[in-house]
Image (tube, coloured by chain):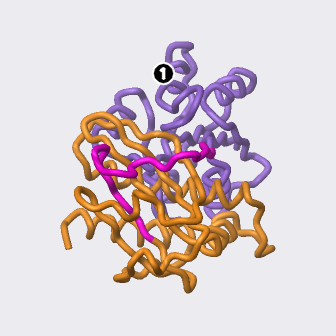
Chain colours: A orange, B purple
Amino acid sequence: MTVLEQDIRDVTESVWSNMLNATAEPRSFSTGALRAPIWTGSVRMTGAWEGAVAIHCSHDLARAAAVALFALESCEPSEEEVRVALGELANVVGGNIKALLPGPTDLSLPRVDTSERSPAMLDAEGPGCTVWFASHGETFAVTLRPASAPGRRPSGDTDVN
Amino acid sequence: MKILIVDDSKAMRLIVRRALRQAGLADDGIHEANNGAEALAQIRAASPDLVLSDWNMPEMSGIDLLATLAKEGRKVPFVFVTSEGTADMRDRARASGALGLIAKPFDADTFKQVLGPVLKKQAG
């Protein structure tokens, strides 16, 4: 495991604990462990380091995150709440990882998209890394890819605020 | 006490509001703005006792909001709440007159630790 992978673990565990009051347990999964549709929340970095950080998870996990983040009494958050929650998690994880990379860099606003197939960013080989976790009985992944890596940016995605 | 939360994320505004309530602040004194421009309009209309602002927002960033307030001669206690707590940003925040920077994700203790002295001063 690289230092950066360990940092991603630490950041993600901290975000899950402080924002969702939940655990994110490191796991060694393959992309097959993610149930479609796959939800991806991502932020892009430009400047001294160019690339993206993304969280990939199932709809059930994104929904559980929204319920926890908004402290909803109902277990049925709206689609907008699910998007906002996943975007904010990506924003906070990305913002913390940004501090570990060469600077200065600018962080984009978060974006969220869904895909029936495994996102290219998740499957990409080469520079960058993917770290797997389990939470709420579901698996999810955090990826860090430099701009040169294939599938850095999902297409057809939308900004969320 | 009137506190203005400035963040483009509805989720984060809710989390900050929750943390303020846990710190003992009355919910009816807490106001929200979606970005720096919206916050500026609210501050011009009625100055809050404290601004808790994100850094990275559309339309007007937190640091631009703080600079505009300074240019207009408005001395509003200002604390950043941001996911990008690099040393450079902390320096820029301090140089621009911010009282502090709370890095996301924060726990209730960190929030109280940074805001405690500010709230005490404002209440007194």
Mark 1 crowdedness (10 Å alpha carbons): few <14, some 14-19, many ≥20: some
- Between A73 and B77, the residue placed more toward the observer is A73
Q: In which quarter of the view is residue B90 placed?
A: top left
Q: Position of residue B77 (x, y in %)?
A: 54, 34
The residue at 42%/58% (across/down) is A120
The residue at 48%/52% (across/down) is A42
Vertical relation: A26 (above or below) B112: below
Looking at this rendering, what residue extends furthest in the top direction?
Answer: B72
Mark 1 highlights which residue? B67
Q: Chain of mark 1?
A: B
**Magenta region includes residue A10:** no
**Magenta region includes residue A158:** yes
Q: Is residue A29 left or right of residue B116?
A: left
Q: Position of residue B81 (x, y in %)?
A: 50, 47
Vertical relation: B48 (above or below) A139: above
Span shown in magenta: A141-161
The residue at 67%/37% (across/down) is B34
